[in-house]
Amino acid sequence: MRKYWHVVKIGFSNTLVYRFNFFIRAAFGLVPLLATIYLWGAVSIIQYQHWFSTNLANFIQTNGPGRKMVGWTEIEAGGIVNNTVLMDWQSGSNSAAVPAAEAGQQVVMTPDTSCYYNYYQSTNYAVEPLGQSGYIPLDVAYNFEPVPTNLPAQYASNILGSAGLLWGEYLPSLTNVEFRAMPRLCAMAELAWTPAAQKNYTNFTQRLLAHQMRSSQMGVNYDVTNIFQLGNWMPAIISTNQGTLTWNVTTNVPATGEIDVSFWYTSGANGLSISSVALLENGSIIDQDIHSGFAGASPSNWIYIVHLPERKPGATYTLQATVAGKGGTASFGNVYLPNWN
């Protein structure tokens, strides 16, 4: 089904102007409809949301036999919309799952406190790609229970299940998508099909080791406990003037593709300024990332990316970083080759 709608204007503080176009011919083979609604202060946004959600749900159900609208928590703001499936992403007092299920509405549980896999998996940002603020480690993802504890048992069947969500603002590649999804997606698969009494996190993590081996064999990326540490820096090897740090990565580079380098400050009164990172093949630069980065108490742009067009048999590959201590050389940190891009 193809359908489109467009909110084109929000006007003054007490006046909202909504225009929406439904290209119904594409969706249901009907004549396109253009409607314009002017809402003044007497009608609240919540009332309009309920009116809009209810009418859209009825329209889809009436004109598309067997079809049902799926909407996020906000569609319930003005009351239950029974002929829809609720995707409840909010938690606590903002959750609409219990009243919706008690009213007979079907619900898919997707609270952002447990199911948003675009959130960080670790508080050690040295081993995490840049992402959206939030923290959902593997154990939190696994221990989530889709059926709310305060939902009477007779309504539990209205909870269809749960879903892991991965929003794309910070997902530049499939490798990055897989890193964020796995192994939390494994936890979602198990919690959705396993009764709470039979869940065992320790047993799950033990079995996960075999699944990670399968993932590696299939070429599927995943978040590992410890990413590869390429090297480090310390006062003895840096200066306040620009100098170079070099590491042999011959055994670490892929056959072809992206190589990520992450500089992570650990301690010291000073940070490390990074000007560039170059990839060398037999001593000659084949790619270079030039930008100003800083690894310190308030890091910025600390990830560098170079590309290997094709790995040549017998060649020696090195990474060379141009760095300087900022304000002094009392700086310690690690350099990582993370498995995400």
Image (cartoon, rainbow, N blue to C red):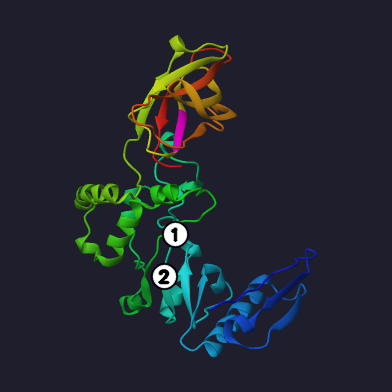
Q: Residue at x 34, y 50 (%)?
A: 220
Amino acid type indicated by mark 1: Leu
Q: Residue at x 50, y 16 (%)?
A: 244
Q: Is residue 310 above or below residue 321?
A: below
Is residue 143 at least partly visible in the picture? no
Secondary-structure class at tag 1: loop
Q: Which mark is residue 108?
A: 2
On screen, 203 above or below 308? Answer: below
Task: Residue 83: give x, y in percent of width and height.
Answer: 49, 83
- Chain part drawn in magenta: 258-263
Question: What's the amino acid at mark 2?
Answer: Val
**Residue at position x 66%, y 79% from top?**
22
How far, Cα to Cα, is label 2 from label 1?
12 Å
Image coordinates of residue 142 in percent, x first then y, are: 31, 55
Q: Nearer the viewer, mark 2 or mark 1?
A: 1
Q: Position of residue 278 (x, y in %)?
A: 50, 26
Instruction: Report crowding for label 1: few under 14, some 14 to 19, many 20 or more residues within 10 A (C-alpha).
Output: some
Query: How many C-alpha atoms fall within 10 Å of the one at disc 2: few (<14), some, or many (≥20)?
Result: many
Residue 63 numbered tag: none
Residue drawn at 41 percent across, 58 percent down: 115
Secondary structure character of the magenta stretch overall: strand
Q: Residue furthest front?
A: 313
Q: Is residue 309 magenta?
A: no
